[in-house]
């Protein structure tokens, strides 16, 4: 009998199910266990590369993790009562996470943003049931970020039952990223270096603290944007969103960093576009900046070093900015291939940086003595109003 005519039997059902994700009953179950992708040449030098943790595979990005965790802990403590509103400032990604948490736990969500929010993000947040409010003018010293936070304070004062996650200072924002660190260990086994963007300080502190406990010699590289005050540079207008700050988030753990890299917007755009072209995996401002620093680090460390770079989100929200030629031409972002290596400064206040620059002296700009009101939160402002 001709064996080629025999029917091919499918594998047993148990074998079919073994390699698939389990069904989930709530959208929160879609968060976590994100993939890890090797990024090598042609983006990196031959024989060198790094591992990219693709947090864009979460429904809304990396901040789905912290939004769900902060909301769950607040409910456990009784800080957030059943059905009470959630109010927070966001440049976008946390808003998506809070909308997810609102659907999961049954809370109305109001997010305060500014005119820099992409139209697509506003549409998505609205579709997911969030009330999106936008401030119209920047704060005189704290920029759009402080203006958003002051508006949060006003909303909280008007709604005594409302709760503010205060992502910039909430320690739950740090604790939320322990599972991500554990995923990295399970995926890589050994990690020699970590490259992370820094904004609220949550995922950089949460991941690095856990990894340093397992790997004491871990090298941690923080990535910021030019014009950000986090690591001691003077405040300046910032085009990039999702990393950097014009205030001093207390969740940033300066003791964990071996070095900081500041990256300018044109350099991040170049890296994000090169990643898309070469590896079909990319994201926006933060991803481009992180990839640029990780690319350089891969050329500095031994070829066998295992470098983990966290990509906070994917490219979708950036189709009208980072990946839009008209937008990039308007803001002079094209045609600026970065240098092969960053400039170096000896300490953060040595001079104002305007391009990719590295510093191995990392200290807290406030030296643990923040002046009164210097980084007041929206929640603080609400308490004062009450």
Image (cartoon, rainbow, N blue to C red):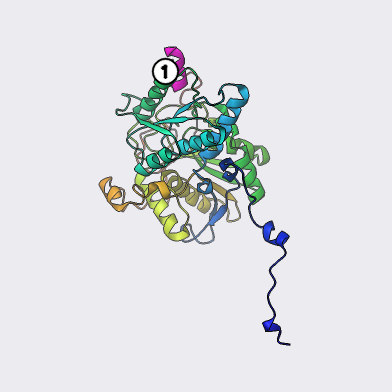
Span of residues in magenta: 375-386
Q: Is residue 316 left or right of residue 179?
A: left
Query: x, y (%) of residue 367?
Result: 49, 22
Binning the other alpha carbons within 10 Å of mark 1 as few (below 14), some (14 to 19) or many (20 upward) gives: few
Whether residue 377 can be seen here: no
Q: Which residue: 35% across, 36% down?
A: 238
Taking the magenta stretch, the answer to whether it contains residue 371 is: no
Quarter of the N terminus within the rendering: bottom right
Q: Is residue 169 left or right of residue 288?
A: right
Query: x, y (%) of residue 128?
Result: 45, 39
Query: Relative to 364, is 278 above or below?
Result: below
Q: Is residue 233 left or right of residue 361?
A: left
Taking the magenta stretch, the answer to whether it contains residue 380 is: yes
Quarter of the C terminus within the rendering: top left
Task: In this rendered view, identify the residue nearer to me: 240 or 259.
Answer: 240
Query: Relative to 346, is 320 above or below?
Result: below
Q: Which residue: 71% across, 83% down?
A: 3
Secondary structure, magenta segment, majority class: helix
Query: x, y (%) of residue 21?
Result: 63, 52
Residue sitting at the far bottom: 1
Query: Relative to 195, is 134 above or below?
Result: above
Q: Secondary structure at mark 1?
A: helix
Question: According to the image, label 1 marks what residue?
Answer: 158
Whether residue 130 can be seen here: yes
């Amino acid at each position: 009998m001709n064996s080629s005519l025999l029917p091919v039997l499918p594998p047993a059902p148990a074998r079919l199910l073994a390699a698939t994700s389990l069904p989930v009953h709530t959208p929160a179950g879609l968060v976590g266990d994100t993939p890890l992708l090797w990024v090598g040449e042609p983006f990196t030098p031959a024989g060198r590369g790094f591992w990219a943790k693709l947090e864009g595979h979460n429904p809304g990005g990396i901040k789905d993790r912290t939004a769900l965790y902060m909301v769950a802990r607040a409910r456990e403590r009784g800080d957030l009562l059943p059905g009470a509103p959630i109010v927070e400032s966001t440049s976008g990604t946390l808003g998506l996470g809070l909308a997810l948490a609102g659907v999961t736990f049954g809370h109305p969500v109001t997010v305060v943003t500014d005119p820099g929010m992409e139209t697509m993000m506003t549409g998505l947040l609205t579709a997911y049931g969030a009330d999106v409010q936008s401030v119209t003018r920047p704060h005189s010293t704290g920029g759009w970020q402080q203006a958003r936070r002051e508006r949060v304070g006003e909303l909280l004062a008007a709604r005594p039952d409302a709760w503010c996650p205060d992502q910039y200072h909430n320690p739950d924002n740090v604790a939320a990223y322990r599972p991500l660190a554990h995923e990295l260990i399970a995926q890589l086994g050994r990690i020699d270096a970590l490259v992370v963007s820094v904004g609220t300080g949550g995922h950089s502190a949460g991941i690095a603290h856990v990894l340093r406990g397992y790997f004491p010699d871990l090298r941690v590289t923080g990535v910021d944007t030019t014009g950000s005050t986090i690591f001691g540079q003077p405040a300046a207008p910032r085009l990039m969103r999702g990393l950097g700050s014009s205030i001093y988030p207390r969740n940033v753990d300066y003791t964990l960093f071996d070095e900081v890299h500041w990256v300018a917007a044109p350099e991040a755009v170049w890296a994000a576009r090169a990643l898309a072209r070469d590896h079909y995996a990319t994201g926006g401002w933060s991803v481009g900046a992180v990839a640029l620093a990780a690319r350089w680090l891969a050329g500095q460390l031994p070829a066998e070093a295992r470098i983990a770079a966290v990509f906070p989100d994917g490219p979708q929200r950036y189709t009208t900015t980072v990946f839009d030629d008209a937008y990039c031409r308007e803001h002079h972002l094209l045609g600026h291939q970065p240098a092969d290596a960053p400039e170096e400064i000896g300490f953060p206040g040595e001079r104002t940086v305007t391009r990719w620059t590295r510093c191995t002296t990392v200290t807290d700009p406030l030296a643990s003595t923040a002046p009164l009101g210097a980084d007041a939160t929206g929640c603080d402002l609400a308490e004062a109003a009450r």
